[in-house]
Image: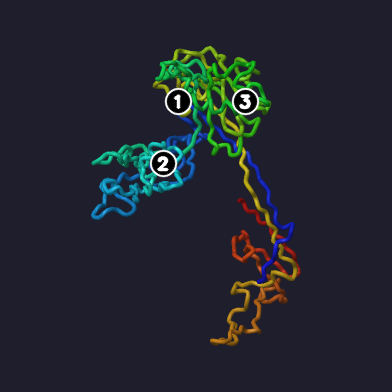
Amino acid sequence: MSLKKFGPNDVIVNTMRAHPSCEFLVYDGKVYYNNIPQMSGANTDNILCTTGSGYVSLYEKNIDRAFTNTDRIIGPSGPGLSSYTASVESAMADSEPNKFVLDTGRIYPFLIKDSSMQTFKTMRDDIYSSFMVGDIISGSTGSAYEIVYPLPNWPQFLGGGMGKPKRYQYPMSASITREFMTGAFVGPTGAGERKTCVDTSDSSTYQCDPYHRHFWALKNRLNFYGILSEHYRVSSSYGDKNLQKVNLISIPEIFFGSGIKPGTVSLKWYYTGSLAGELRDTKRNGELIEVSGSNVSSIAGVVLYDEGFILLTGSWALNDETLIMEPGAGIDKPKWIYFGAGANDKINQDNTSTKFNKIAFNLSFKGASDTQVVTVFAHAKRGEANYSNNPTYLQYGQTLLQATSSHVYEENPNRIIANTVSSSYSGYSASFKRQVYISRIGIYDDNKNLIGVATLSNPILKEEDQDYSFKIRLDI
């Protein structure tokens, strides 16, 4: 059958934007995502919740694969060597690159050190420098089997694969995190405070590293959004965030896609099951306005829609209850600067107070998911698409070939097409009509290579005098 070319109006490329809802519940030091409860099972940690129900697996790798702490290797080893430890020691003694990795029974990322200087994002420079050119830097062991070479007679294993924490392994996960930027356990009086360092040359002091790097990293972005609201600015008539207590909620991109939809952000604070206060971005300009609580219409923070950050500075009491919200701090009342306590910030009932399990936090919003969609129209015009390669298209029992040899291949020109026209009478064949059943549509590229097949849920009967157009959609 001849191929048909798409016309100028038969291929349409557009973008479909969806706004999936996302909700987090923080209670008693645990995070719950979209009301998914804790799941029991031997391999649930690998499937959806690497550490708990509030996590999402990033790549869905190592599903149902148990970690096996073996001493076997993958790759070539030295003569007579079979164990990972012995192979590493032999390679280091001969100053040879490690071209093998520890076999853990799991999928892992790896890099080979070369002149491109590629490395893992979370690997320190000094660790990377400890590898030789040609070494395989893998995620199969803790710290990617961090090894220090300079020792004269014996290798020093700082990471190894002996049950140490795994830094570059799948499955990887993501969840919201909270940072309380100030407090008695840190020392400074505000989120922008910096450490005091001493110049060894003259013993003078100067301001050096900040206590809260993430706040400093967001300063320029906060001032940039100052055109939307003065509440974004680091320093404005509403206060100086450098001197304020700041509560930072970080939302990974996997949850909101290309951005958080303005007007959908809601933060709810519960105490003993009752709503103590709620913030919403009702103006859609990033301002989080209290719509329920003790100080309605006041602005308690801002949202960075494109970046996925929420900064809270509201320090008024939501009710008259008292409890400890931060380790090492004194008794205080519920405030927006404490919102989300327990969201992967190592705060729980053990290091605060017994009242900590009386509070709960709910964060909800809608993200933005953009999907590129290709829509094509395939036309089966009248008088066309009237032949089938299905063997049942021809009457059964006919001779298909008239002559065949090493020089000739000739089909029978008198083959008869099977009559598939339905009759209203039993045992009687209706008059013959040329018709086919269309079940699949193939899509080819410019070089006539098959690149896709669209299969219909039910074959469609097409008679010779009929026109059909098929709409095919593909998400890319």
Circle 1: residue type? Asp
Q: Where is residue 311 drawn, in percent x and y? A: 57, 24
Quarter of image, res 435: bottom right
Left or right of 307: which side holds 69? left
Circle 3: residue type? Asn
Tell me the number on the disc at residue 223: 3
**436 up-or-down from 234: above or below:** below
Tell me the number on the disc at residue 257: none
Toward the viewer: 367 or 461?
367
Crowd around label 2: few <14 · some 14–19 · many ≥20 (10 Å)? many
Q: Do callouts 2 and 3 mark residues in contact (Cβ within 8 Å)?
A: no
Quarter of image, res 10: bottom right
The span from disc 3 to disc 1 (Cα, nearest Å) is 35 Å
Q: Where is residue 85 drawn, in percent x and y? A: 27, 45
Circle 2: residue type? Tyr
**Labels 2, 1: front one:** 2
Quarter of image, res 160: top left
Asked whether residue 254 is in view, the answer is yes
Please, what secondary structure does the residue beneath circle 1 have? Answer: loop
**95 up-or-down from 385: above or below:** above
Toward the viewer: 120 or 133?
133
Please, what secondary structure does the residue beneath circle 2 have? Answer: loop
Tell me the number on the disc at residue 28: 1
Label 2 sits on residue? 168
The span from disc 2 to disc 1 (Cα, nearest Å) is 29 Å
**Labels 2, 3: front one:** 3
Counting residues from the N terminus, which is met first, the one under dot 3 or under dot 1? 1
Counting residues from the N terminus, which is met first, the one under dot 2 or under dot 3? 2
Counting residues from the N terminus, which is met first, the one under dot 2 or under dot 1? 1
